Amino acid sequence: MVFLRSYLFVPGNNLSVVKKAVSSAADCIILDLEDAVAHSEKEKARETVEEALLKFGKEKTMFVRINDIGTSYWKKDVSCAVENGAKGIIVPKAESEYGIKMACNEVKSCIGNAKNEFCIVPLIETAKGVQFAYEISSADKMIQRLAFGSIDFSLDIDCELTPSGLELLFARSQIVIASKAAKIAPPIDAVFPNIKDEQGLEREARFARQVGFKSKLAIHPKQLATIHAVFSPNEKEIAEAKEIVEAFEAAEKEGVASITVNNTLVDYPVYKKAVSLLFQIDNS
């Protein structure tokens, strides 16, 4: 599995912006057919997304955010994404196991017998979505990770967004725990709406990483460097992980499973965490 740190939203109806995004440092691009597109432009935007996937799909990992399953657009969005080479879809307003299974079944009907590895990412952005995050996570093997939509979530529960992010701690934690319990990849954190507030972005990204998120949604290429810096292990972390792995594996050969490395106790959980970090580096 390739570890993606950044997912950059791009309006699905603007091919020139998509082209610029492809040349950016984004690990993944999300072609947006939902919030970024007016209702009168949905059909035209889908044609643009098809063209973008065919032109740039081999240059960059691309997902499509479809319209939610309560609309008349979503099935055509799924077909567009699957048939033109998208790596996956983002399903907005994911709130139930039943709803996400509908999206999964629609993808399967489009794929047919082809052995395509296709990823479905439910976007959790309501109280109901947070409440049923585990059921959504474990609904189908095509679901590889969740994503958090903090702005819509805050509107849904009528809370006040603050720089500390404390009001979103429970929701973030619930999504991380549900992902782990369902044995899927760590979730993607929400967008940070102020593209000029680099310090605020870094603060929020670090908070999300501390909670257990391993990547973040972005709305502008200016945000990518900060996101990558936060969600990439630094040289000190890599060196410490290598030291832990080498020391523990040497001790294990001697029948010892609890040692001290740099005055820190190292047992199997600590060793496994170090191995996971080095695996992430090798596969990024």
Image (cartoon, grey):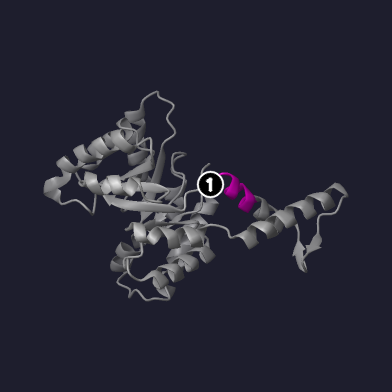
Tell which residue pokes out farthest to the right in this image. Answer: 254
SS for tag 1?
Answer: loop
Tell me if residue 83 comes above or below residue 68 in the rendering: above
**Residue 127 horizontal/vertical position (percent):** 35, 62
Q: What residue is at 40 percent from the left and 54 percent from the top? A: 147
Magenta range is 276-283
Question: What is the x, y in percent for residue 264?
Answer: 75, 67
Residue for point 28% across, 46% down:
18
Which residue lies most toward the left here? 40
Residue beneath disc 1: 284
> Which one is nearer the viewer's eye here, 64 or 8?
8
Relative to 87, residue 233 above or below = below
Q: Nearer the viewer, residue 155 or 19?
A: 19
- 1 drawn magenta: no
- Considering the whole magenta stretch, tell me its main secondary structure: helix
Residue 122 in sight: yes
In this view of the protein, which residue sits in the foreground, 38 or 2? 2
